[in-house]
Amino acid sequence: MYVQFETVLYPSMTQAQVDALSREIEGRPDSPRHLAVHRERRLLELGMDRVDYRVWHWNITNWRISQDHQLELTPYADFGRRGNQVWSLTPPQMMYGHVDTMPAAREPDVSLLRRKEEVCQVVFFGMGVGMASDLQPVSSMFDENGWVGYAANPDKTKILRWRGQISSDGETVWISEWEIVRNDRYPAGVGFKARFGEPVEHDGFATPVPERVQEIRPGGYLYREIILTGTSRIFREEFEQIGRIPEVGKVDTVRGRTSPTSMVDYRRGQGVYVTNLDAETPIKVPLHDAIVSSKSSGILRWTGWLLLAGLLTTGLLIARRQWQTR
């Protein structure tokens, strides 16, 4: 399965907020929030940022994800898995690993972990993996405007409201919006909502899927859009080419000739950092990251990426009439 989509990110801070954060971290060059300041300044300057995603998914242990950036420090980042071998590729660095010997801090790649909410937008209709895990439907009704349903956790401290439009055959409802109406644990999140475009049939999907998702923060401002731009089936021969693990200095099917100047290699357990790859004698430095089993690793265990095609095949969050209260 091949899925292509883009995310458009809008500023989440005002100029005054960015300036205040910049003053707060002044004199602390190691603060990770310098990246946030840089990013928000660029967003305010340009008005938006876009990341293009291409996902090739053969099965749960064979996949590849390609990201193309506008505002990041590197123009692209690719990640993949081939059996038990995992890898990541950016213009300056190649990383190889094994699912059983990849340190948590170097799982391919920590930036992918930061990006996973964008896939959640597509797969889980704007909800993070755990957001709705403890919710159960509590009420629903149909009116002249469509369908409204509520779900809550057992103690009613978190409540979400869904809105939907009735299909032409009157048998199903396609979800057009959900909104957090109560969240005692994180009150600032009340009013956060996601809106979904009308579902459209796509090749390879069992049910129609929305082509556009809009994420709206409390206060009513648009924060992010997810736009599905293409899907298709893939064949084994095609995936064998695209899913092949890139090699330093050789031609990659997606990125062309790769020429990173450094490499991190965990395929044999103990990590090795190799720099000056373009020199006659590269420099090798042993790494001492704590080795962890993939059973406890974040991104290798987080299978939303791997199951993108499968989960999207379930299509829309269908609200059937049996949800209607009697």
Image (cartoon, rainbow, N blue to C red):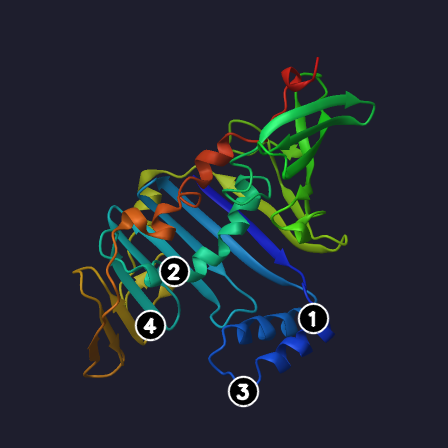
> What amino acid is labelled 2 in the image?
Asp
Q: Taking 57 as reference, is 158 left or right? A: right
Instruction: Please tell me how crowded label 2 is: few (under 14), some (14-19), or many (20+) other residues with Cα within 10 Å.
Output: many
Which residue corresponds to mark 1? Answer: 44
Percent across and percent down for residue 40 are 63, 70
Q: Compare residues 326 and 316 and report the one nearer the observer.
A: 326
Q: Nearer the viewer, mark 2 or mark 3?
A: 3
- For residue 169, the mark is none
Percent across and percent down for residue 60 are 34, 40
Q: Is residue 183 above or below residue 161?
A: below
Percent across and percent down for residue 37 are 60, 74
Which residue corresponds to mark 3? Answer: 27
Instruction: Please tell me how crowded label 3 is: few (under 14), some (14-19), or many (20+) other residues with Cα within 10 Å.
Output: few
- Mark closer to the chain start, 1 or 3: 3
Which residue ends up furthest to the bottom in the rendered image?
27
Q: Nearer the viewer, mark 4 or mark 2?
A: 2
Which residue ends up furthest to the right in the rendered image?
144
Alpha-carbon distance for marks 4 and 2?
Answer: 19 Å
Q: Element at badge 2? A: loop
Percent across and percent down for residue 74 are 47, 70
Q: Quadrant of the N terminus?
A: top left
Which residue corresponds to mark 2? Answer: 109
Residue at the image position 56 percent from the left and 34 percent from the top = 202
Q: Compare residues 193 and 212 and report the one nearer the observer.
A: 193
Alpha-carbon distance for marks 2 and 1?
Answer: 27 Å
> What amino acid is labelled 4 in the image?
Ser
Which residue ends up furthest to the front in the rendered image?
155
Which residue corresponds to mark 4? Answer: 259
- Mark closer to the chain start, 4 or 1: 1
Q: Taking 58 as reference, is 129 left or right? A: right
Which residue ends up furthest to the left in the rendered image?
268
